[in-house]
């Protein structure tokens, strides 16, 4: 009988083989996605920033610790390290997340992106939109048309059983919060973090996992943008950007991997193997 470590590696091998076989298809889809990104209106920055995927990580720090730095009371952002270990301040820490629910004790924390990971939103009318969300911008109400990624409902329900799930998006709360209300009908997200919780670093809104208030060895981020987790790439499970391909199965195919990962103690070694394949 396979042990948990062997099981997750088996799931990971199947998942990576699938990713490899779809490589050629993904290239064409990626090219199409880039064209769509370039054609977005000026409102596209309302959802999230234009990302520079070649952004460099911050410089490393020799003084290290296993716990993250706090959110400063004056709102300033301390420098972040590419490695997850950062000096601990002596005052009591104030973190982005509240205390963990009793029902989540023992679970790992999974940070999940919104746009192009779970949904795709547009100011242009979409005939098959799952949601239409009114959003006020500069005194004018705009209709935002939202498409759900295939299998997102099943993905969220299962992830909510396995992990402490947190929504973390670079989009503004006035758009992302009502979308999350419609998307998460099961209360999967224990907390929601928006653009103001990001660190603006070299033109990108970076999700600094060290500010969550969770042990980094138990934190995983699921995001389509490498720039979003440039401070902690060793904690990431990358996903392909999604716009409107209704035959996409990536979220469904990730579930066996996450089921195995939820039982692993050494998250870093599993994710390192994922990156190395």
Image: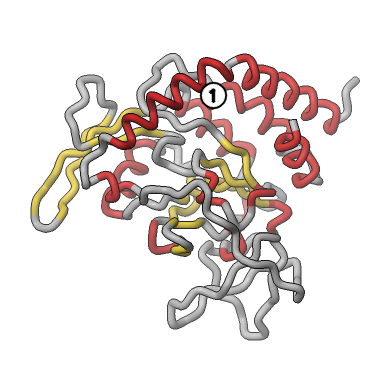
Q: Is residue 112 left or right of residue 180?
A: right
Quarter of the image that includes the N terminus: top right
- Using the image as rendered, state which of residue 126 and residue 204 is in the foreground: 204
Rendering coords of residue 257 (x, y %): 68, 29
Quarter of the image that includes the C terminus: top right
Residue sitting farthest toward the left: 140
Rendering coords of residue 240 (x, y %): 51, 31
Q: Is residue 190 left or right of residue 263?
A: left
Classify 73 as above or below 186. Answer: below
Rendering coords of residue 245 (x, y %): 40, 19
Badge 1 element: helix
Task: Kindly identify the residue that appears in the image at 67 percent across and 25 percent down.
Answer: 256
Rendering coords of residue 29 (x, y %): 44, 21
Task: Kindly identify the residue that appears in the image at 20 percent across and 37 percent down.
Answer: 123
Q: Residues within 10 Å of mark 1 (few under 14, many from 20)?
A: many
Task: Kindly identify the residue that appears in the image at 53 percent across and 62 percent down.
Answer: 97
Q: Is residue 17 left or right of residue 152?
A: right
Classify 262 as above or below 125. Answer: below
**Total numbered labels:** 1
- Using the image as rendered, state which of residue 64 and residue 146 is in the foreground: 64
Classify 104 as above or below 87. Answer: above
Q: Is residue 19 left or right of residue 97?
A: right
Residue sitting farthest toward the right: 1
Residue position for label 1: 250
Q: Quadrant of residue 252?
A: top right
Task: Kindly identify the residue that appears in the image at 50 percent across and 74 percent down.
Answer: 77
- Using the image as rendered, state which of residue 199 and residue 160 is in the foreground: 199
């Amino acid at each position: 009988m396979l042990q948990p470590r062997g099981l997750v590696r088996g799931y990971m091998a199947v998942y990576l083989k699938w990713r490899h076989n779809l490589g050629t298809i993904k290239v064409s889809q990626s090219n199409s996605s880039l064209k769509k990104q370039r054609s977005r209106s000026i409102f596209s920055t309302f959802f999230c920033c234009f990302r520079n995927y070649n952004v460099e990580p911050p410089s490393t720090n020799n003084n290290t610790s296993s716990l993250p730095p706090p959110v400063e009371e004056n709102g300033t952002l301390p420098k972040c390290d590419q490695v997850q270990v950062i000096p601990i301040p002596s005052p009591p820490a104030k973190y982005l997340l509240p205390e963990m629910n009793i029902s989540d004790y023992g679970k790992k924390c999974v940070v999940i992106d919104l746009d192009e990971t779970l949904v795709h939103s547009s100011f242009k009318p979409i005939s098959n939109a799952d949601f239409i969300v009114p959003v006020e911008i500069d005194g004018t109400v705009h209709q935002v048309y939202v498409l759900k990624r295939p299998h997102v409902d099943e993905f969220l329900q299962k992830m909510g059983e396995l992990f402490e799930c947190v929504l973390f998006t670079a989009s503004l709360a006035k758009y992302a919060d009502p979308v999350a209300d419609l998307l998460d009908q099961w209360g999967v997200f224990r907390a929601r973090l928006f653009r103001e919780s990001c660190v603006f670093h070299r033109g990108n809104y970076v999700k600094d996992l060290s500010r969550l208030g969770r042990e980094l060895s138990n934190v995983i981020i699921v995001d389509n943008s490498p720039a979003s987790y440039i401070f902690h790439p060793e904690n990431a499970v990358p996903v392909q950007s999604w716009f409107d391909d209704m035959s996409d199965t990536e979220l469904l195919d990730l579930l066996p991997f996450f089921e195995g990962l939820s039982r692993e103690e050494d998250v870093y070694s599993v994710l390192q193997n994922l990156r190395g394949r």
